Amino acid sequence: MREFDYVVIGGGCAGLSLAYELDIHQKLNNKTLAIIEPREEYKRDKTWSFWKVAPHNFEDCVKKNWKEFSIKTSSGSKIIKCDSFPYQSIDSGLFYNKVKHRLGKNKNIKFFKNINELNTNNSFIFNSVPSLDGFGSNLWQHFQGIEIETTEKFFDDKIVNLMDFDCDQRNNVHFFYVLPFSKNKAMIETTWLSKEDKSLKDYDSQTKSYINRLGIKDYKINFKEEGAIPLFHPKYKKEKNKINIGTAGGMTRLSTGYTFLNIQEHSRFIRINLENIGNTKKYDIGKKYQFLDQIFLKVLKKHPEKMPGIFFKMFGASYDATIKFLSNKSNFFEDLSIILKMPKWIFIKSIFN
């Protein structure tokens, strides 16, 4: 059986981002790396979007940048400028092609379908596959998105509709999300923040109804994606010569589901500390954000009907401050400006409950 210095379990966003980061910085010139990934082929299957609050390696995979986004509830809407931190959307197909092309040039990097093909006794393992069985009662962000192409120019391609809460909530938190790539092409996504509930997964009828409500009649579907992001961090037993990355490593921001940029920063941290990674302090996205997110999720569980208004009020603070807060880059005064916009009593009660 073959042996490798490093083994990455899972060749998705986190695993490939780490391999790419190590390769472009010549960390694998004299070391070997195996990537365990069962899929038969790589093709577009995801859309990763975020505010660009930090540089990353995949600017050439960005499908579109926006400098404005909107939030809408049943009682009002607002358009928010984000010139300092443009909202970006990455096409996973472009990402996979770029990374696979680069890694394919390094003879020290190999792909395998199953870890049982390797002897890992002397390998350092980076695991990106979370263990999520038995967590149905926890909160999830689950969604289905379709990219549609209309026969006529319909969309304002300068503004992302980040959250449209003016829709059926079913005693949970529900919004639509629209990424307009051009005037006649957009990703339209129905998104729920809820426990596991099959009754909420009639995604096709939800998106069809929303498209009809927008007044779009003639269109075709170019692409469909579906997924679920855990809004919790599963506990893992610490193991020698193994660390978790990606969602498995706590890189998902629990109040938002944003993960991509956190993965990139974790990959850089690993690359910088690679020679002593087993003894390096665990990387996290910030204790204060973990604390605040837990309070936020308690409120979401107990008062889902208040969440549209809470998200709306959040952007009553400085737009840049709110974006930085949601992207783990805010300072104390920016945090305070956002906290002061929140309905204080239900958050205070959630701290002590």
Image: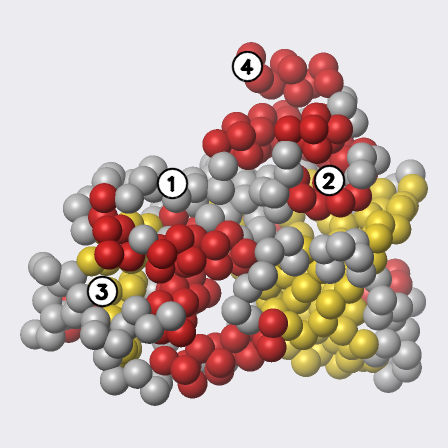
Total marks in image: 4
Q: Quadrant of the C terminus?
A: top right
Horizontal and vertical percent position of residue 306? 75, 30
Mark carried by residue 353: 4
| CA separation in Å, label 1 and label 4 | 21 Å
Q: Identity of the amino acid at label 1?
A: Pro
Q: Nearer the viewer, mark 4 or mark 2?
A: 2
Residue 234's tag is 1
Density class for disc 2 (Cα within 10 Å; few <14, some 14-19, many ≥20) is many
Q: Which residue is mark 2?
A: 321
- Residues at badges 4 and 2 in contact (C-beta under 8 Å)? no
- Mark 1 lies on a secondary structure that is loop
Q: Classify mark 4: residues with Cα within 10 Å, few (<14), some (14-19) or many (20+).
A: few
Q: Is any atom of residue 126 visible in this view? A: yes
Q: Quadrant of residue 320?
A: top right
Towards the viewer: 75 or 97: 97
Label 3 with label 1: CB-CB less than 8 Å: no
Q: Secondary structure at mark 3?
A: strand
- Rounded to the nearest angstrom, the CA distance separating label 2 from label 1 is 29 Å
Instruction: Calculate the distance from the C-alpha at mark 3 to the C-alpha at mark 4.
Output: 44 Å
Q: Are marks 3 and 4 in contact (CB under 8 Å)?
A: no
Q: Is residue 118 left or right of residue 10?
A: left
